[in-house]
Amino acid sequence: MAKILLAEDDPSMRTFLARALARAGHEVAEVGDGMSALTRLHDEAFDLLLADVVMPGIDGVELARRAGEVRPAMKVMFITGFAAVALRARQRQHPGARVLSKPFHLRDLVQEVDAILAA
C-alpha cells in the first residue's frame, strides 16, 4: 500500500480516480489544485504525486517541480487529456515521471501506479 497525493481539478474525475486507487489498496489524499497539493506536501510525506497536467493556478508540471524541492524522493506521475507532446519536452525536469493520457481504463491507472511505485 502506498500513500498517494492526487491533484485533479475536475471533482468527478478526482473522486473516480481516488476510489479506484483506494480499492487497489492505496491510501489516497485528494486535492483540487496545485496550491492545495503543495500545502499538503509540506505537512505530510507521500510515496507518489499523481497530478493532472492542466490545472488552474499551478499546473501539474510546476507542481511536480516544486514538490521535488520539498519531497525529493517522492515519485511523480502525470495524467492528461491533452498536452502530452508539450509535457514530454518539459519532462526533462522529471525524467522518471510517467504520463497516462486520458481517456484510460482504471485497470491501466492501477497498473501504471503499481509499476512506478515498484521502480
Image (cartoon, grey):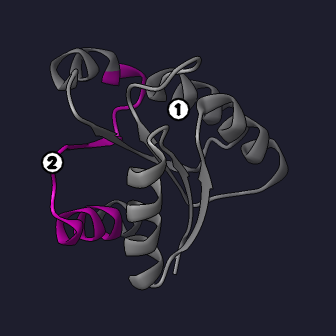
- The residue depicted at 23 percent of the width and 15 percent of the height is 86
Q: Which mark is residue 2?
A: none
The mark that comes first in sequence, 1 or 2, is 1
Task: Inspect the magenta stretch and tell me whether residue 105 lies in it.
Answer: yes
Cα distance, mark 1 to mark 2?
22 Å
Residue 101 placed where, x, y %? 18, 41
Q: Is residue 27 above or below residue 67?
A: below
- The residue depicted at 78 percent of the width and 38 percent of the height is 39
Badge 1: how crowded within 10 Å, few (<14), some, or many (20+)? many
Report the residue marked by disc 1.
64
Report the residue marked by disc 2.
103
* 43 displayed left or right of 10: right
* 52 displayed left or right of 98: right
Q: Nearer the viewer, mark 1 or mark 2?
A: 2
Question: Quadrant where the C terminus lies?
Answer: bottom left
**Where is residue 58, by image quadrant?**
top right
Task: Identify residue type, mark 2.
Answer: Pro
Q: Is residue 118 above or below residue 25?
A: above
- The residue depicted at 51 percent of the width and 81 percent of the height is 1
Task: Identify residue type, mark 1.
Answer: Ala
Q: Is residue 26 above or below residue 58?
A: below
Which secondary structure lies at badge 2? loop
**Camera-side residue of 89 and 4:** 4
* Region in magenta: 91-114
Residue 117 placed where, x, y %? 41, 65
Count of marks placed on residues: 2
* 83 displayed left or right of 74: left
Residue 94 placed where, x, y %? 40, 31
**Camera-side residue of 110 and 103:** 103
- The residue depicted at 63 percent of the width and 35 percent of the height is 67
